[in-house]
Amino acid sequence: MLLVVDIGNTNVVMALYNEKMWAASWRIHSDQMKTSDEYLVIIERMLTQKGFKPKDILKGIISSVVPNLTRSFQKVVYELSGVKPITVTHDSGVGINRETVPSELGNDLLANAVAARAIYPDENVVVLDFGTALTLTAVSNKGDILGVSIVPGLVTAVNSLFLNTAQIPQVQLRVPDKVLGRTSEQSIQSGIMFGYAGLVKELIDKTEKEISSSVKVIATGGLSHTMAPLIGRIDRIEPLHTLEGLKIIAEAN
């Protein structure tokens, strides 16, 4: 089986692929204070709880945007399974023209572009990733990375309000009935949900004008299902989109 590890700023997402389907997935908090030994215990326990054994892992791949955790998980995967995992770099972009990859592009966004190319190989595509940051990654029908837009994620924006204002409550993100809220919770929900929907639509529109072409739109991340009806421009929702990109990279190596 293939073990895929996607290390983000907020969460580490892990999944097992058995050559036919995703067999299991896990999500844990990204904690740079934990040692590799602590992560080893956690991951081994999660595998056991799902009915898997470390020896089931025959291949591994790691994508990371947290350098301090990269080596820890390289060590964890090796000690757990005896497999030396592939570590994603800018040279890993299957179907992506290496010379067009920006020097600061996150490996998760590269994986998003790889998966987008696999889904729409003959189209210009943008991938919306609703994570800690909301990212829009554009890739051309020739495999060029056209560029990226980044804004704070929806949950990040809400948490910022909660932490930096005295009378703003922490709220659950859901679509309100009205734009004009009568409570703090309703008002925040309206501003975030409708405001971000407008922001995303504007980014897509400006992308199409900038490249003089229409684009296919793929959405991934926790809030993609909630936001899709508000945006109205999303062609596909792919909850495991980043993992699919990493799987493609692993299979090519």
Image (cartoon, rainbow, N blue to C red):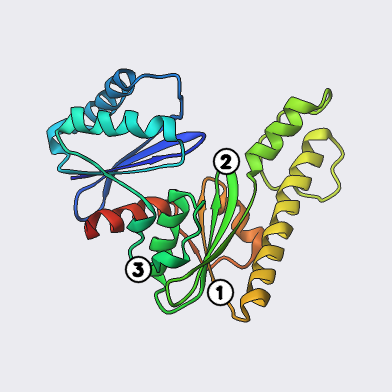
**Residue tagged 2:** 132
Which amino acid lies under the numbered mark 2 shown in the image of this protein? Thr
Residue 197 x %, y %: 69, 57
Q: Amino acid at mark 1?
A: Val
| Label ID, residue 215 | 1
Mark toward the start of the polypeptide (2 vs 1): 2
Residue at disc 2, secondary structure: loop
Q: Identify whether 25 is placed above or below 229.
A: above
Q: Tell me which amino acid carries mark 3.
A: Gly
Q: Earlier in the sequence, mark 2 or mark 3?
A: 3
Q: Gap between marks 3 and 1, in whole Å?
A: 18 Å
Q: Residues within 10 Å of mark 3 (few under 14, many from 20)?
A: some
At 33% from the left and 57% from the top, the residue drawn is 92
* Number of marks in the rendered image: 3
Q: Which mark is residue 95?
A: 3
Q: Is residue 169 visible?
A: no
- Locate residue 34, reporting x and y percent: 40, 19
How far is the residue under mark 2 from the one under mark 3?
A: 27 Å
- In the rendered structure, the answer to whether residue 154 lies left or right of residue 26 reads right
Res. 113 visible in picture: yes
Foreground of the two, 197 or 209? 209
Mark 2 surroundings: few (<14), some (14-19) or many (≥20) residues within 10 A: some
Is 1 left or right of 129, judged from the image as shown?
left
The alpha-carbon separation of the residues under discs 2 and 1 comes to: 24 Å
Label 1: element kind:
loop
Query: Residue drawn at (63%, 81%), measured in percent from left and top?
Result: 212
